[in-house]
Amino acid sequence: MLAAMSVAALVLGAGRGARLGCELPKAFVSVSGMTLLERSIRVLAASDEFVAIQPVLAKRDFDRFKELRLQDLPTLREPVEGGAERQDSVRAGLDSLPDDCAWVAVHDSARCLVSAKDVRRVVAAGISEGAAILAEPVRDTIKRVVDGRIQGTPRREECWAAQTPQVMRCDWLREAMAAAASESRVGTDDAQLIEWLGRPVVIVESEFPNPKVTRPEDLVLAEALLSQAKTE
């Protein structure tokens, strides 16, 4: 039996964020006076769901991490070095976790507006079902395109935009990563690796805005959402 409380979180922030157009690594770009990384870590800590919160960063950014004022968070661990691909960073973080962690929540630091309530909801679903992700229904019509030509139009009601955290059993994720590595397959998120194993992943619809900061306009949106939240 897996222990219900042995859940750890990985916070991914090893990317450079070239599309954001900032000199700083994306995880260390500030929105409303706080870095994306710190906001993400603090909301995970506020959810009170995790026995360990493990940042995964580029080694060159370890000194920047030390400058963040996070000493008040007892579950926060020292960063480990990420890799060239997302899967490499997740594997490094997973390998660093305590042996008694049965579940892991993988979170992109760029999704710094996720709510503690949504974190708790997706963790509960992951523990119940084995794997769960935050997501929201798409509003636009989606086209499948190859070489600039439309190849098909999936039913919009079947399409969801994946978010993070993505919560899953550690043994499932390790198995999925090993299988993907043996076949030289690279997924765009962690749920895709679990899907390749043929295991079910459930959707938890996010109740609060959870955009990913990728481009300059996303910073503007994040600032606006934070400003709105302060007035409510």
Image: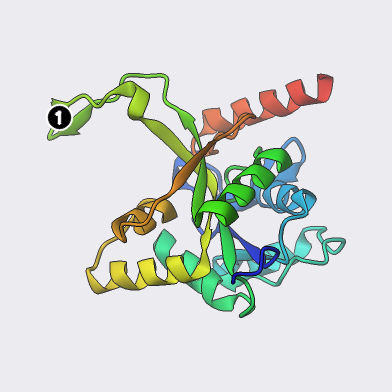
Residue that protrudes farthest toward the front in the picture? 1
Q: Position of residue 33 (x, y in %)?
A: 77, 40
Residue at 36% in and 51% down = 188
Write down the quadrant of residue 207 in the picture: top right
Kind of residue sitting beneath label 1: Gly
Residue at image mark 1: 148
Nearest the viewer among 12 and 155 is: 155
Residue 143 drawn above or below residue 36: above
Q: Is residue 153 left or right of residue 55?
A: left
Q: Position of residue 156 (x, y in %)?
A: 33, 22
| Quarter of the N terminus within the rendering | bottom right
Residue 217 drawn above or below residue 114: above
| Quarter of the C terminus within the rendering | top right
Whether residue 82 is visible, yes or no, is: no
Q: Position of residue 230 (x, y in %)?
A: 82, 25
Residue at 54% in and 66% down = 58
